[in-house]
Image (cartoon, rainbow, N blue to C red):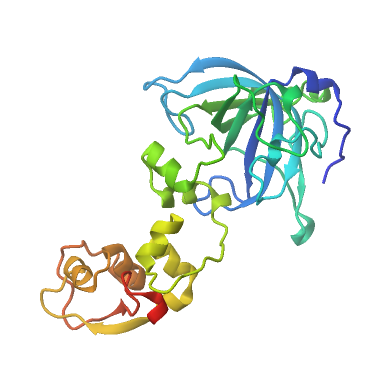
Amino acid sequence: MGQTLPAAMALQGVANARLLLQQLDYPGAVSAQPIARQAWEVSLKQVDLISSRDNGPGIDTGDILCEGFLCRAALLPARTTEPWDWLAKELPWQEPGLRAVLEEPAGRRRSTIEVPAGGLCWFGEMGGLTTPVSLPDQPRVVLAGVSLLLVGAAYGPGGIGALLQAELGEAITVAIKPNRVQVIGPGDSLAVLAARYGITIDALRQENPELQDLKSIGAAKGDSLYRLAGRYGISTGALRQDNPALMQAAPYLVADGDTLANLASRQQETVSALRLFNPQLARYPASAPLPAGVTIQLPVIGVADALAEL
């Protein structure tokens, strides 16, 4: 890790926002995994409002395009049980004006944030931040999604140039996303957010790796996969994948006229569940006849079966 600096520094006074950005192992890769989070204090100014003519990779209609520079950055663990830790008054800041550097144990690889990177942006009164941390109670604060589009611009990887680097920090371009899903209250849950923004719970988990942590849940007598999925805001497929005991299957010989749709109906299952047990059927439309005489796997434990009785 780079040098940790005292909280007070020359650039701190010009920061008007704090960002939380996900640092990925391979930025831009389909299966990229978060290896750290970085908290940035930045100085930003608005340069454009994105219209339908201007949207493209990383920017959508209604986004606010901003430019500025990085004041200071701090490394945070990739996962946390405290969602607002990045808004603590004091953080382990590294060198002024530069992205924080992660020293990874394997091979002592050194890495930092690269574009594309996404996260959250907090515009509020910096003096209102507290430690221990909590979401600051500031009525005029703006909490929105953000995408990091560019670091350095025409000035090279240093951002502003080697001679002025320590004074001005790395140049950055970001897109503020006021329409992105936001957690705005202590009572918010995945189910509440999904209903508010018209999105599925699974999609929220997929776009937010920090929500993927597994937790043990209890099944009372008479509970089924359907009941547990509804109670905990998760899909029956996810419950099965995270609990190998629920992936028990029995062979079935496909008959003439069998389709994924009618098999799912007879089994009181979903088509997606049958595809989970039979990945080779992913290319078959739900209503297309399956090849007769082929053996496939059907779930032993149905979504409506009482788990405590099995």
Relative to residue 152, is residue 272 depicted above or below? Answer: below
Q: In this orientation, does residue 164 appear?
A: no
Write the residue at 49% across / 33% down: 58
Q: In this orientation, does residue 113 appear?
A: yes
Write the residue at 87% across / 40% down: 3
Q: Nearer the viewer, residue 51 or 248?
A: 248
Q: Nearer the viewer, residue 170 or 214?
A: 214
Q: Position of 119 compared to 166: left or right?
A: left
Count of marks placed on residues: 0
Q: Position of 116 compared to 133: left or right?
A: left
Q: Nearer the viewer, residue 186 or 144?
A: 186
Residue 97 x, y percent position in the rendering: 78, 28
Relative to residue 202, is residue 185 depicted above or below? Answer: above
Relative to residue 109, is residue 133 depicted above or below? Answer: above
Residue 39 x, y percent position in the rendering: 70, 36
Residue 272 x, y percent position in the rendering: 31, 63
Write the residue at 51% across / 41% down: 188
- The residue lying furthest to the left in this view is 257
Write the residue at 56% across / 66% down: 216
Residue 24 x, y percent position in the rendering: 62, 48
- In which quadrant will I find the C terminus? bottom left
Q: Position of 39 compared to 191: left or right?
A: right
Q: Position of 266 compared to 97: left or right?
A: left
